[in-house]
Image: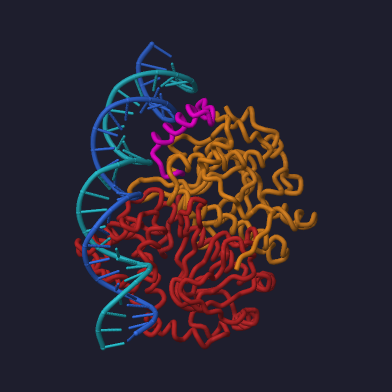
Chain colours: A orange, B red, C blue, D cyan
Amino acid sequence: MAASKRSPVVNLSRMKVACKDCSLRELCLPLGLTEDDMGDLAKIIKRTRNLKKGDHLYRIGEKLQSLYAIKSGSIKSLELAQDGYVQITGFHLPGELIGVDAISDERHPCDAIALEPVQVCEIPLNSLEDLAGKIPGLQRQLLRIMSKEIVKEQGQLMMLGKMTADARLATCLLSLSERFESLGLSAKHFRLSMSRQDLGDYLGLALETVSRLFSRFQDDGMIKVEGRQVHILDLAALQALAGDVQDWNKPSSRSAS
Amino acid sequence: MAASKRSPVVNLSRMKVACKDCSLRELCLPLGLTEDDMGDLAKIIKRTRNLKKGDHLYRIGEKLQSLYAIKSGSIKSLELAQDGYVQITGFHLPGELIGVDAISDERHPCDAIALEPVQVCEIPLNSLEDLAGKIPGLQRQLLRIMSKEIVKEQGQLMMLGKMTADARLATCLLSLSERFESLGLSAKHFRLSMSRQDLGDYLGLALETVSRLFSRFQDDGMIKVEGRQVHILDLAALQALAGDVQDWNKPSSRSAS
DNA sequence: CGTTGAGTTGACTGATCTCAAATACGGTGG
DNA sequence: CCACCGTATTTGAGATCAGTCAACTCAACG
């Protein structure tokens, strides 16, 4: 159902194969690549793969063949504890590269499941590594992407280790808002592709707690909730709840000791 | 006091500069490198840097200059929330590479502080990247290391998101035990370099909770605690508590779907 | 129009935190 | 080598945030 009213970003992506024509090019492996480099990159990329909601992109334990760049839709990565508990380690949106965590032992350490209809570009790892050996910019970009993934997870650790339930949800909503915005979608109004259960499994909370928080946030006038549709009404309040941290990514400089 | 009775691994490390002679070589950037490669690698590595307990290896926000390979001692990485809360994102032992999380935006996203006297090799990132462009094995190794870091943090997410307090501590103790063992130290008897507070900040628990758990584990006969000295008495019980997960790293194979 | 899964809401429970106090330890100066 | 001080650790008691169990609503679907 969602497929029919996707944003332009998503519609575009269906027909393009070459990276240099892809509207997401700057997001997958951006910067430092020349037109020629992009051409080489495009050559190693296999055809688009389509997933329905609930389909696995890969399963835990499977041998790593390729990394995937998400062209449209969203994906959750999750780990299963032996006792059946689920921990979602990330939600992945268009323009993001998924599967890098499998490089270390050449097996996927988690499941990746489509939250809605998804299109991905398949990038054989061997070819990518070969190419990275020839194109310094690509090599650096790969390292950057993985480093960023590490930083993102560190933030997640802070969230799970120290933040209250409401701060967690506020942080999560703000993060999604920013990411939607950088995809050219509305930062104030969006549709969540994940269930309350998924959010709970991501935030380390019970689904009932997530549901209650949505209700409370709405009662407090911070957001408007209609099922999975979310309107952000009071950004500042959300940021305050999330514990708006100054961030080192911003252009402003600083050094220490 | 600890410095005087360090293991051979640690004593060795003081006098070596060249990687191929370093007893930790297999741990820092192992595998797939020829003798010549090792020589090239050694050339770019700067002199050892020594830290006292409590010293910063780097601070949050500082510009990334180098990665560091730990030769001896241990280091904690931590993030600070605006409200003063601390989340320790990792404990780093000899043979580990630290600082890779700073590659993405060329600034360190966290503080790194010595938990005891520490020796590190400084590896200028630019030189390392250049070298990785020439040595495919090194490039792959870098990607592997970063990927492993991501996987490690995913496990940490599971811990913080879903595990009970006792499972968290058990998991942490087992992890340290394994890592000590792979350094050639005893897996059953070791000294923690971090305080109860540090453990709490790592595990997402109050220090009092950590302390109580140590007492309880001891009462249950699983471990013997003398301050920071820990003896593991009942490995199986600890593993059971930690929710001993079958792991995909082991040689045994499997595929799915 | 019944069945099913997602989401909401309420009542109660409990694991973990917070506050507080006692004790042990590590390091320092005499 | 010993006394002393500040910090780390242990332990207790009460408070609380979030989890669990359960009932109910709603929308989608056949």
Left or right: where does residue A182 sit relative to residue B85? right
Residue nearer the viewer, A89 or A132: A89
* B162 displayed left or right of A89: left
> Toward the viewer: D4 or A41?
D4
Q: In the rendered view, would you say A39 is above or below B56?
A: above
Q: Is residue B180 visible?
A: yes
Q: Residue furthest right?
A: A35
Q: Residue, x 59% and y 58% (percent of image)?
A: A146
Nearest the viewer among B113 and B122 is B113
Q: In this view, does B221 lie above or below B120?
A: above
- Can residue B255 be seen? no
In which quadrant will I find the N terminus of chain A?
top right
**What residue is rendered at 43% in x and 50% in y?**
A162
Q: Does the magenta run of residues contain A26?
A: no
In the image, residue C10 lies at what x, y percent?
A: 32, 25
Residue B40 place in picture, x, y as percent: 65, 81
What residue is drawn where x is 48% and y is 54%?
A: B84
- The image quadrant of residue A234 is top right
Q: Is residue B52 left or right of residue B142?
A: left
How far across and how far down the image is residue B213, in percent?
A: 27, 58
Q: In this view, does A245 lie above or below A222?
A: below
- Quarter residue D9 falls in: bottom left
> In front here: A218 or B221?
A218
Count of marks overlaid on the render: 0
* Magenta highlight range: A202-228
Decide if residue A65 is on the left or right side of residue B88.
right
Q: Return the x and y of residue B225 as percentages of the image width and height.
A: 26, 69
Tell me which residue sits at (42%, 32%) in the image. Answer: A212
Quarter of the image with the C terminus of chain A is: bottom right
